[in-house]
Structure formats: C-alpha cells, structure tokens
Image (cartoon, rainbow, N blue to C red):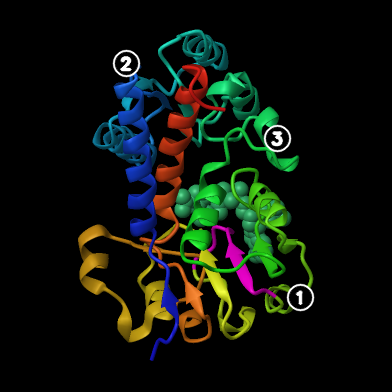
Amino acid sequence: MCAARILYGKPVQEAILEEVRQGVEELAAAGLRAPKLAALLVGDDPASAIYVRSKTRMCSETGLDSEAFQLPSSTSTEELLKRIDELNHDAGVDGILVQLPLPEGLDTDVVLDAVDPAKDVDGIHPENVGLIVQGRPRFVTCTPGGIIELLERNEIEIHGKNAVIIGRSEIVGKPMAMLLMHRHATVTICHSRTQDLPGVARAADILIVAIGRDAMVTPEFVKPGACVIDVGINRVADRQRVEEIFGADADWQKFEDRGYLVVGDVHPAVAEVAGAFTPVPGGVGPLTIGMLLANTLRSARRRLGVGS
Ligand code: NDP
C-alpha cells in the first residue's frame, strides 16, 4: 500500500509554460518580438538529439522562436567557440543552450565559459552561479530551479527544514544547495566519500537525490514522512536488475518494447516510507525544460528592456 503523495512534474511544468505563454503574449502586445533560444548540438548522441528536439518543440508550443544547430562530432573547440561567439553577438538570440555532454576531446569548461552570461539560460556560467550563491540569481540553474518550483507549488515547507542533497554536481547538487539555503533550509550535501550515507540521509525532511545510480536510495535512507525528490535518470537494460528493483511490478511489456526501463536513483520501495516523492519518469524531468523556457523569456524581457 502506498500512502505517499506523488509529486508529478507535468502539472507544474504546465503552470510554468502557461506563465511563459502569457509573458510572450505581453511582449507581442507591446509590439516586441518573441524570445529566441539557440540550441547547439555537437555529435550524434541519440539521447542528446531527443532532448534538443523536445526543447525546440516545447518552444514552438509556447510561442518562443528556436533554432537548433547540429554540428558534427569532428567539430573542434575553436570551431564551437566561433559559433558561440556569433550567437553571443546575434541581437535576435536571447538564450544559448549547449547540449551536454559534449563529445570527447572538446573542452566543456572552456565552451560553457564562452557563452555570454546574459544569454546563459541554463544558469551554469560561473558569473550566474556566483549570483545564485549571493542569493540574487539572474538565471536559476534549470533542474534545481524546477525542483524549487515543484516544492513551492505543492506547498512543501522549506523554511527551517533539514534538506539533504546526495550529489554535488555543478548542474544539480551545488546550485540546489544554494537555492534551499536561501529559502532557509538547513542544508547538508553528500557525495561518494560521505560516511554513513543512509544515516545522514535519514535526518532529511527533504531528501534530494542526484547520483546517477539506479535505485540506490532504499527505505533505510528515508525518515518516515520525508519528501523525496528523485533527479536520477538511469536506463536499466539488465533483466536481472529490473527483477531486483521491481519484482512482480516490473513493466515487462515496456522492457521488451524498448530494451530497457528508465529508473530513478530512488528505489520504488521508498514510496512506502516517504510522505511525498517524485516518480521517474514524470517527476523532475519535465520541470527542467519548463525552467529553460522561463529563463529564455526572462532573458528576452531584460534584453528588450521590459524586465529586470
Ligand atoms: P554527476 O555524475 O555529475 O554527479 C553525481 C554525484 O553523485 C557526484 O557528486 C558523486 O559524488 C555522487 N555519487 C556517485 N556515486 C555515489 C555514491 N555511491 N554515494 C554517494 N554519492 C555518489 O551527475 P548529475 O548531477 O549530472 O546527474 C545525476 C543524475 O541526475 C543522473 O542520473 C542524471 O541523468 C540525472 N539528471 C536528471 C536531470 C533531469 O532533468 N531530471 C537533469 C540533470 C541530471 P562525487 O562528487 O564524490 O563523485
């Protein structure tokens, strides 16, 4: 029996996109152009291509312009920097997205640092990260920003609560910690060297898990009634592992159709202990795209002189 509240991402994403649509309409009513996102995809990673397609499709459904630039995997760092420089100087472009991961041989830090911080709608440029640390964000990093929206719009109290984050990446764990701290949570960040991880995690009222290991967080990590946010997206193609995780509840039809199942970092049995949790898929995933579009609107408003 599952008593926990399931926090779905879709309704929150829809609410964010509706606000973006309204913002785009306001620009149009003022005689201003639509916001524009430029997406750079290097190489032929199928998952990255799917992500870029869904981002540009979501843009057109929300009234934003977008353009995807597909570059071959042989692209050098210098060539990519040149393309970024062109987009930095293109007055019609408000947001620049470099789809990660980049192919081996490209210097990701150098590439991301080259994006104009005023167009860094992923919120990962060091200047934007610095502003997040100082509590005056220009663009909130998309996934952690989406998680804050999910918590706040579901009226999950953050103020004064113990928040534990497992994972210290630049795109999830670190900015997540800052956003929660600025909302007055007491924050602990864990990683691969943390001692007694289940014990530390059990102190959490809000447990955020961004590790990249299927079903690693089991009920022993979770205080009864805690809110558990599962960021992980893992493809499990091993039949025995699917059996271990899902037992009799495994969706074998989906497994046979696709050759894998998408599994979070949190074990399904956590639903029996948690007070609220996000499903995978369908939890955090949709929020990341919602925040990307919200950031692109924000950038356009600033650049068109109608927003701060
Ligand atoms: P990274 O690989 O950059 O970071 C993983 C973090 O987990 C590291 O800090 C690492 O610690 C920690 N970790 C790894 N193994 C353990 C362990 N056994 N015990 C404790 N900590 C551990 O991952 P990301 O943050 O980029 O992504 C995490 C997951 O979230 C992935 O599955 C990714 O696909 C997913 N994701 C989903 C998004 C969405 O929109 N839903 C967006 C972004 C990511 P250390 O630093 O010590 O190595």
Name the outermost residue toward the bottom: 1
Q: Position of residue 135 (x, y in %)?
A: 71, 42
**210 in the magenta segment:** yes
Q: Which residue is mark 1?
A: 196
Q: Amino acid type of disc 3? A: Leu
**Quadrant that contains the C terminus:** top right
Image marks 3 and 2: residues in contact by CB distance under 8 Å: no
Which quadrant of the render holds ligand 1?
bottom right
Q: Nearer the viewer, mark 3 or mark 2?
A: 2
In three-dimensional space, the C-alpha distance between marks 1 and 2, rounded to whole angstroms, equals 58 Å
Between 240 and 66, the one lying in front of the other is 66
* Residue 61 versus residue 147 in the image, above or below: above
Name the residue rendered at 30%, 23% in the picture.
29
Disc number at residue 131? 3
In three-dimensional space, the C-alpha distance between marks 3 and 2, rounded to whole angstroms, equals 31 Å
In three-dimensional space, the C-alpha distance between marks 1 and 3, rounded to whole angstroms, equals 33 Å
Element marked by disc 1: loop
Q: Amino acid type of disc 2? A: Gly
- Left or right: where does residue 172 sit relative to residue 232? right
Between 95 and 257, the one lying in front of the other is 95
